[in-house]
Image (cartoon, rainbow, N blue to C red):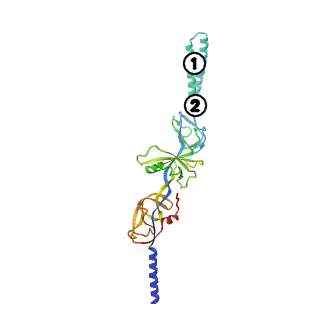
Amino acid sequence: MGLCGLFAYTSCTSKKEKKEEASKYTATSPLKIDTSFTKEYVSQIRSVRNIEIRAQEKGYLQNIYVDEGQFVKAGQLLFKIMPKMYEAELLKAESEAKAAEIELQNTKTLVDKDVVSKNEQAMAQAKLEQAKAEVALAKLHLSFTEIRAPFDGTIDRIPLKLGSLIDEGELLTSLSDNSQMFVYFNVSEPEYLDYETNKKGRGNTKVSLLLANNQVLAYKGDVETVESEFDSETGNIAFRARFQNPDRLLRNGETGKVLMTVPLSKALVIPQKATYEIQDKLYAFVIDKNNVVKSRNITIGGEIPDLYVVESGLSESDKILLEGVQKAKDDEKIHYEYQAPNEVISHLRLRTE
């Protein structure tokens, strides 16, 4: 019986210790600090120059000298439209110019002999000038049968094949200069106002680019311009950053996320582990003066590694549950150990200024 009693006593003691251990909680408070956080903005990536290459004359596509995705140099021949008709036009114009020149020489001779008036010579001269203009125009039309790259760039898709009949203005391909890229991202009105009115506090204009594979581009970009108008539907305004692209990794039409460092003065921060989420809303347990926990919905204004920047819902004087958030229940009276917020945050990853 004594042995059974000992087992019973040991079992009860063990359960009591486990219960006491399970009821241990740690609390802290929000802390105001000067810091910064990185904010992500969905972005569209565009080439600094992206143009459509179109036919300037009608005819059959005689030659294609490049392939899709090929890098070409400025002035390089891309396409040739069958030039026979335009060559014939040039020959005709040159022959008419030669005839006009002969006519002018004959008229000059007759003027010198007072056979015809000087007006006749002026008319012949004008006729020659008109013929020369026709030659220049024919040469221009003939030059349009050779389509060359206006700048260094990468060839896009070529929709037409050899022998296709091409109309004037028909799309042959597109050409992208990807040596540098424009990255556009939308910023809300409050963020825009903070950016423009806090030029000293915001630091430099450097931003990073997070690519679709979650890798950060090796080169940083510069925010160089802000559009002139807000979008009336979204309330946002577009920023543009320029990124160097020497490896030609970025292409026109890609997407990514601009990472901008936003400075914060007297930001109220709490550890992320002091919160829990229900239906896309974030909550924290606040401990009242009677040591009773109450859940409170909070709004987050930014995110730092291991920390949330609290926009609303908490104050510096609140005590919040730090450890034991997952097992606490609303209106539960608890015993806790308080840790100073400075001490808590010193063990977390944080960039302070």
Residue 142: mark: 2
Q: Quadrant of the N terminus?
A: bottom left
Above-or-below relation of 38 to 69 = below
Q: Give the percent coordinates (x, y) of residue 110.
A: 60, 12
Judge whether 210 appears above or below 328 on screen: above
- Spatial CA span between label 2 and label 1: 26 Å
In x, y percent, where is residue 95? 59, 23
Mark 1 surroundings within 10 Å by alpha-carbon count, few (fewer than 14), some (14 through 19), many (20 or more): some
Instruction: Kindly give the residue lying farthest to the left in the view shown.
Output: 331
Badge 2 marks a residue whose secondary structure is helix
Q: Relative to residue 291, is residue 260 drawn left or right?
A: right
Query: Which residue matches tag 1?
Result: 125
Q: Is residue 221 visible?
A: yes
Residues 89 and 229: in front is: 229
Q: Please, what is the three-letter code of the amino acid marked with disc 2?
A: Leu
272 relative to 121 in the view: left or right: left
